[in-house]
């Protein structure tokens, strides 16, 4: 059996694991909101129409801040439509997803849902088809206590306390030609700077995220970040990254190495941001909000799923309802390892998305809700990764992939919570054929024993949880784990994701 060696030492801290790293994303898209989190006729629905079975799963998932209301949706969104008496709210065309938005769920309802799941709101403003004034208006409506037209309107609409939204995204994917109001980096940078300045004049305590690239493979990648940050460096706190991965052409080895791409993406954006800071002689650091990441079979969406036709604007159609396999979940777990490995500069991240739409949680109208395979790496990492993220010294066998060249077969990161005396290890085996025995030197962590282990793997890497078989896949304890004389050994099966908690 091939072997790998790791050394874990609390002296090699990367940075604190900020809870915002475990954020989510709810977009008005497909069956995410309607027939997803909100289904008034469902047997589990509460008085406000929210499914309590979904609320329970979202809590179990352990999501922190949730980005809302889009995504591509936000670039056509008029926030005023989503507040006030529900019966008076307009039905609007959603051009991004060729659907009808009923506005039955809006800012007040969604905030109430967030209180139920225990998460904070991260709001996106429309800088695609709207501008600074509308962004400021929404901020006034949300964050000013009372005594102005818009804060009093919020109070009249039933919400006395301000929503107190701290994180704001300045538009969405403005580099993408598919985006309503898509612009050049220069044009977007100027608008984002003006909107940011105005918003800060109103509320200096907000955190602002400027749009970075929609993927590291956009033709404008790198130059987009440089130009946009040159305009906005003093005005914003974070720059966004978005990345989706899928298996293409049956190339499982490259797909399993997707986190190599994410690592490179983050490191290049950090380098570009720091370059802009250096040119300006600024001591300020711009962090990353990785506010869309996941496995997504985008090629499939561009094929069969697309809705078309001037008379065809459905409400809550089935869109982007990817069903995730064990293989997808291993890649997904590795993406979380990549985020933790960059905890010094990735201050915030949002799994895209949460329910039904490329989501860890699925629902059937009038039926059950269940956990997809990707649910498990997220919920376990969110629960166990505490304290500081640690850089591990890794010696691993490698193999060659078509897309990323030579890559290590094992990838890993550790966390250490000095106060609680707890540590955790997260590992993947990217080999499709071989188990790998990993020896981890944990002596520097002190006298710890294994509290729990979870390995997600299956003889059938295409196994999924579906409506018909909702609990087909789940992580299992890894019985191979041993700790002796400061060395932990564990066997990682082929195509597997593993978490080990020590304390
Ligand atoms: O998450 C689905 C879509 O992916 C979002 O609306 C958009 O921002 C991205 O292209």
Image (cartoon, helix red, strand yellow):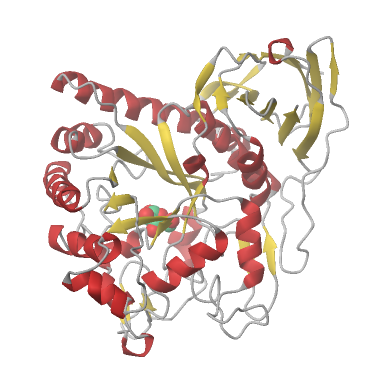
Q: Residue furthest right?
A: 479
Instruction: Examine the rendered structure and indicate whether residue 147 appears above or below residue 471.
Output: below
- Position of 35 with respect to 207 (left or right) is right
The residue sitting at 38% across, 83% down in the picture is 312
Number of numbered tags placed on the structure image: 0
Quadrant assignment for ligand 1: bottom left
Residue 320 seen by the camera:
no
Residue 433 seen by the camera:
yes
The x and y percentages for residue 371 are 68, 58
The residue sitting at 28% across, 60% down in the picture is 143
The x and y percentages for residue 328 are 63, 46
Taking depth in this image into account, of 420 and 54 the one nearest to the observer is 420
Taking depth in this image into account, of 457 and 17 the one nearest to the observer is 17
Taking depth in this image into account, of 76 and 197 the one nearest to the observer is 197
The residue sitting at 63% across, 52% down in the picture is 61
Q: Quadrant of residue 314?
A: bottom left
In the rendered view of the protein, which quadrant contains the C terminus?
top right
Instruction: Examine the rendered structure and indicate whether residue 259 appears above or below residue 249.
Output: above
The x and y percentages for residue 327 are 67, 43
- Position of 366 with respect to 184 (left or right) is right
- Position of 502 with respect to 120 (left or right) is right
In the rendered view of the protein, which quadrant contains the N terminus?
top right
The x and y percentages for residue 79 are 27, 70
């Amino acid at each position: 059996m091939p072997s790998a060696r790791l050394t874990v030492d609390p002296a090699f801290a990367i940075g604190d694991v900020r809870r915002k790293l475990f954020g989510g994303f709810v977009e008005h898209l497909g069956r995410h909101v309607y027939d997803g989190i909100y289904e008034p006729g469902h047997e589990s629905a509460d008085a406000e129409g929210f499914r309590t079975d979904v609320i329970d799963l979202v809590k179990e998932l352990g999501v922190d801040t949730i980005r809302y209301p889009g995504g591509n949706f936000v670039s056509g969104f008029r926030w005023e439509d989503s507040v006030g008496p529900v019966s008076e709210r307009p039905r609007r065309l959603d051009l991004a997803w060729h659907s009808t938005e009923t506005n039955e769920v809006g800012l007040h309802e969604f905030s109430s849902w967030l209180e139920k799941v225990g998460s904070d709101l991260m709001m996106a403003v429309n800088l695609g088809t709207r501008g600074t004034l509308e962004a400021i208006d929404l901020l006034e409506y949300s964050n000013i206590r009372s005594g102005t037209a818009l804060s009093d309107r919020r109070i009249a609409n039933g919400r006395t306390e301000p929503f107190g939204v701290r994180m704001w995204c300045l538009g969405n994917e403005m580099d993408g030609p598919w985006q309503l109001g898509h612009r050049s980096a220069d044009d977007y940078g100027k608008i984002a700077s003006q909107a940011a300045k105005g918003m800060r004049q109103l509320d200096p305590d907000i955190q602002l995220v400027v749009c970075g690239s929609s993927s590291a493979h956009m033709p404008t990648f790198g130059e987009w970040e440089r130009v946009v940050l040159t305009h906005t460096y003093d005005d914003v706190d974070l720059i966004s990254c978005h990345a989706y991965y899928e298996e293409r052409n049956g190339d499982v080895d490259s797909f399993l190495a997707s986190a190599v791409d994410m690592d490179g993406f983050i490191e290049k954006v950090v380098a570009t941001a720091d370059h802009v800071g250096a040119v300006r002689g600024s001591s300020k650091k711009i962090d990353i909000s990785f506010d869309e990441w996941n496995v997504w079979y985008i090629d499939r969406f561009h094929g069969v799923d697309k809705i078309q036709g001037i008379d065809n604007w459905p409400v809550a159609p089935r869109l982007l309802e990817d069903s995730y396999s064990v293989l997808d979940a291993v890649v997904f777990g590795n993406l979380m390892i990549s985020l933790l490995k960059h905890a010094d500069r990735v201050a915030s991240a949002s799994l895209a998305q949460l329910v039904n739409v490329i989501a860890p949680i699925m629902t059937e109208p009038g039926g059950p809700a269940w956990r997809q395979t990707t649910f498990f790496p997220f919920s376990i990492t969110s629960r166990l990764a505490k304290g500081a993220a640690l850089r591990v010294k890794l010696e691993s066998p490698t193999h060659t992939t078509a897309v990323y060249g030579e890559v290590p077969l094992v990838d890993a990161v550790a966390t250490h919570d000095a106060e609680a005396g707890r540590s955790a290890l997260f590992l993947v085996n990217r080999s499709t054929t071989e188990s790998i025995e990993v020896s981890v030197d944990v002596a520097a962590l002190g006298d710890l024993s294994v509290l729990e282990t979870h390995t997600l793997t299956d003889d059938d890497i295409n196994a999924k949880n579906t409506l018909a078989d909702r609990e087909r896949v789940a992580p299992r304890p890894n019985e191979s784990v041993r700790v002796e004389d400061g060395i932990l050994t564990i066997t990682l099966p082929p195509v597997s994701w593993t978490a080990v908690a020590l304390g």
